[in-house]
Image (tube, helix red, strand yellow):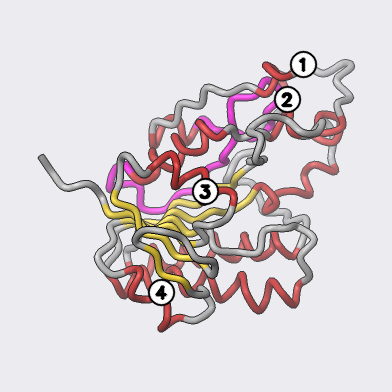
Amino acid sequence: MTDRKRVLITGAAGLVGSVLRAGLSGRYTLGTLDVRPLEGDHLQGSMTDTEAVRPAFEGKDVVIDLAAHAPTATPWGRIYENNLPSTFNALEAARRAGVRRLVYASSNHVTGMYERDRPYADVVAGRYDGLDPSKIPLLTPDMPVRPDSPYGVAKAFGEAAGRYYHDRFGLSVICLRIGTLNRSGRPEGQRNFATLLTHRDAVHLFERCVEAPNDVGFAVFYGVSDNTWRFWDISDSRRSIGYQPRGDAEQWR
């Protein structure tokens, strides 16, 4: 029997990190890193401090990088000081430690400006008259980025940096444009009926990224449940890594 994969989660004390720690702990040997204290194999420190956090990366097979200030209203100065260096430092520390793969928590806000266009603006507002959810043109990961905030700009930077680290150093990088993952795991607003990512589906998606074949060198996937009004394409993650979401926000309509 082979040893369990050693997985590091950065930003592990946040909401997504808490969901993943609960869902992945039985399958992998988890290490965590955050500015806040946690129990277990944990290093308390900021991802902006390269040398301080490097020991957490040593001996890990996969890194799940969640470290960032998440609110979309975060001003550019804070994004510049924290999110950009945190992402770059995660990639560099993973490279130096010989990590095989980094799973980067990107965001749907990388393409958030599409939601100003029809039919997406109608969907997020719940104006369904005349719309057939099966005929809505899906947004695919290879479409041009259209960030809706400094936070979205930083996530687009992270995807580009991940591409560089794969092409230049051979690090496998999978970027997940996470939809709406909240504490309740259910819709809390009209937009959520299109964008919800349930806790179960989030854990499953990250697990499939950890277990993805070695030939998945660089990829960008949308992280969303199989919602009836979903407008992000997930056919590539189904095909490439075996993502099989079960959630549909309509069950809470």
Q: Is residue 134 visible?
A: no
- Looking at the image, which residue is at 41% across and 83% down? 51
Label 1 secondary element: loop
Residues at discs 3 and 1 in contact (Cβ within 8 Å): no
- First along the sequence among labels 3 and 1: 3
Furthest residue in direction front, as rendered? 39
- Hey, what amino acid is under mark 2? Ile
- Hey, what amino acid is under mark 4? Glu
Label 4 secondary element: helix
Q: Which mark is residue 92?
A: 4
Residue at which label 3 appears: 18
Q: Position of residue 102 (x, y in %)?
A: 40, 58
Looking at the picture, does residue 194 appear above or below residue 169? above
Label 2 secondary element: loop
Q: Residue 81 lies in what quarter of the image?
A: bottom right
Label 3 secondary element: helix
- Looking at the image, which residue is at 51% across and 32% down? 201
User: Does 188 sit left or right of 125 as displayed?
Assistant: left
Query: What residue span does the magenta drawing correspond to?
Result: 211-235
- Hey, what amino acid is under mark 3? Ser
- First along the sequence among labels 4 and 3: 3
- First along the sequence among labels 2 and 3: 3
- First along the sequence among labels 2 and 4: 4
| Prevailing secondary structure class for the magenta stretch in the rendered image | loop
Looking at the picture, does residue 73 appear above or below residue 90? above
> Mark 2 to mark 1: distance in Å?
7 Å
Residues at discs 2 and 3 in contact (Cβ within 8 Å): no
Q: Position of residue 141 (x, y in %)?
A: 58, 44
Q: Position of residue 203 (x, y in %)?
A: 46, 38
